Image (tube, rainbow, N blue to C red):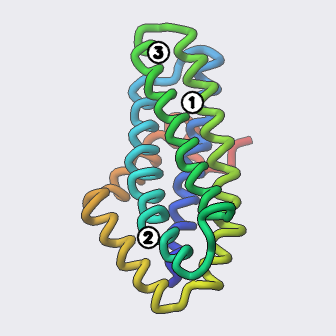
Amino acid sequence: MNATDELQKEHRFILAMIEIIGELCNRLERDGTADPGHLAAVIDFIRTFADGCHHAKEERALFPALEAAGIPRENGPVGVMLAEHDAGRRFVTAMDATLDGIRAGDAAAARDFIVNARGYMELLVKHIHKEDEVLFVLADRYLSPDEQERLVREFERIERDETGAGAHERYHALLHELRGVYLDGRPPGTRT
């Protein structure tokens, strides 16, 4: 298994949450029925899983390996991905800043959440496409099987030591719960 296979599986998981975020925004915009606790849980998912686990694997393991293999950071795909990770963090910080206002019934806070959540969604969908179709293709071409195996071990270490045991299971359960509430229990991508 290539290290990029694991990252692509995580992308599918993140895209499933993005679909849920879209429905949360629709409900918040339409009639305010999005649960503020669910909004907070989504932010936790993004910060802990998408950023703290997935992006950590890329930033601390994959990207340095790509640079060592001759793929430049500056003016190259690694630099673009890093800039987009930072842009995503700014959207999430802005989303988080609205939660107290949303809990208090502030319509302006709800609008700010929606704007930033949709910005995050648009950014991440395009970002994931670029990684899947460009960066990971380069990684699979430039990184040897031994380097891929080393990366898989490093990903396991990041998950165990930094993200914490059980994080994947916890966020799979959250995704399943929110899917049941916001997507009528159907798998992402099947709404009509």
Residue assigned mark 2: 61
Q: Measure how far apart labels 2 and 3 are at the Cα level.
A: 37 Å
Residue assigned mark 1: 24
The image shows residue 107, relative to residue 5, as above or below, that is above
Residue assigned mark 3: 102
Residue under the image location 56 percent in, 82 percent down = 69
Residue 186, x across and y down, in percent: 59, 47
Tag nearer the camera, 1 or 2: 2
Question: Which label's residue is closer to the chain start, 1 or 2?
Answer: 1
Q: Measure how far apart labels 1 and 2 are at the Cα level.
A: 33 Å
Observer-nearest of 124 and 77: 77
Residue 89, x across and y down, in percent: 50, 41
Kind of residue at disc 3 = Ile
Dots 1, 2 in contact, CB < 8 A: no
Q: Along the horizontal axis of the image, is 104 left or right of 2? A: left
The image shows residue 7, relative to residue 88, as above or below, that is below
The image shows residue 146, relative to residue 99, as above or below, that is below
Residue under the image location 60 percent in, 39 percent down = 120
